[in-house]
Amino acid sequence: MFAAPTLNLWVITPLIILTVWAIILMFIDLFIPAGKKQWTGWLTLVGLIPALALTLMQWGQTGGAFIAEGGQPMVVVDNFATFLNTLYLLTGILAVFISVSYIRDAGLERGEYYFLMLFSIVGMMLMGMANDLILIFLALELLSIPLYILSGFDTGSDTSEESALKYFLLGAFSSAFFLFGIALTYGATGTTSLPVILDTISLDDPLALAALGMLLVGFAFKVGAVPFHMWTPDVYEGAPTSVVAFMSIGAKVAGFAALMRVLGQGFPMWGELWQPAIVVISALTMIVGNFAAVRQQNIKRMLAYSGIANAGYILIGVAASATDPEAISASLYYMLAYLFTNIGAFAVVIAVEKLDGQKGLLVEDYKGLAKRHLLLSLALAYFMFSLVGIPLTGGFTAKFYVFGAGVTAGLYWLVVIGAITSVVSAFYYLRPVLYAFMYEGPAVARVSRGLMFVLVVAVFATLVFGIFPGPWYELASQATFGNVATFVAGG
């Protein structure tokens, strides 16, 4: 007989707030005049800020929602989920500030932009909270479908529509792999619940091994890891820049959240099998991402390959977690530092981009920027220094922690590759800085109040992470997940 699952609303309250507010905002937007759609953008914060406050209140708590008859929750809240949900919500808030002026100036001012962003954030949050493979798949689709639409939001641009089509087709292809992996997992264990998989899976079952391989393919696509990265440069180049800034962080972090939970809580006993695969993917991702970025003249494509390379660095911590679960904290800290550095870099790109004809996106378009906008150029330099991993930046401490996790796990050659590719990255990261300060040119920029707010926050956060990393790494250390089987309906 079917038994309705036990529901714990406290666990999913932030998700409820975002979902309900997105639906309400759809109706409010009907009464906002066409020329005032920035109001819809600012009203988006009415949902994001309370959701962030409630998420922070969940720190230190554990609980489950949708408890099935077997006692296993489909949705869990723990410090791991709370830490990542905070990142998504911060990304959403900062993305609103950089989007309001951008989509207005680009002639894309439509309320749907913000509804889609809210629904995508709900999917991201579910990715890290899901305790069941079926729910992870549903969260993946909820995250991805709005991003497909947002990528093609500039309907007057052929490149934007092309990027949306490529993202959709390759995303559907990878989803098929992931869904097939779920089916094989169910065939091998009779369940899709991660704790039950942990208890029932057999190390000698080839069906389960094939399932793990399929799941890894799906996750590798979502985080943009080599060799499943092909969509990233084209999508980043064609999609509106404000969308790219949002998805380059949110989608990547969400993919890693689900990957970490599945490997760490569904297949931890197979660490000796999946660690070599993660190590190889990490090495290829760092090498291909950094060396391909060297050749790029379009700064959005350059940052796309940069995002690929950074996925490789995060994977060092994931690989190390096969032998030391605490190594996950290094990857979590890396994603925290990467959030502010990357969104700050994209804020500079938006400031320089000229929306009449998509000009200002070449690296050489930054020539002479320092003479007209010194503070903006200094911010650009600092963000690029952080992405390289130069001391006194958040990027340096992030790489220090993931490299340390790799060394502790005995992955010495992977850390060496990470260090070498970091040196290579200096060539392309510092090139726009060189153009800005050392060359004459007509570079101009427009910095709205929203962009200025994001730049100030991003610089400050990157500086704090670079000088005082200890407290923030301690938070990341507290966010490593425990045994899911301990979650109960009452929290």
Image (cartoon, helix red, strand yellow):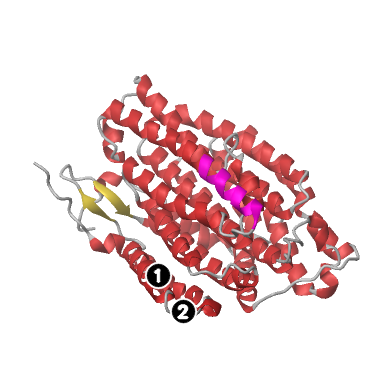
The crowd level at tag 2 (other Cα within 10 Å; few <14, some 14-19, many 20+) is: some
Residue 227, image x, y percentages: 59, 34
Q: Secondary structure at mark 2?
A: loop
Q: Quadrant of residue 17?
A: bottom left
- Main SS type for the magenta part? helix
Residue 345, image x, y percentages: 67, 61
Identified at 49% across, 34% down, the residue is 217
Identified at 68% across, 37% down, the residue is 288
User: Was residue 165 drawn as part of the magenta stretch in this picture?
Assistant: yes
179 relative to 289 in the view: left or right: left
Q: Is residue 479 visible?
A: no
Total labels: the figure holds: 2
Q: Which mark is residue 26?
A: 1
> Residue flagged by tag 1: what amino acid is it?
Met
Q: Gap in Å between the C-alphas at discs 2 and 1?
A: 10 Å
Residue 246, image x, y percentages: 55, 59
Residue that mark 2 sits on = 32
Quadrant holding the N terminus:
top left
Q: Secondary structure at mark 1?
A: helix
- Work out whether 161 lies above or below 17: above
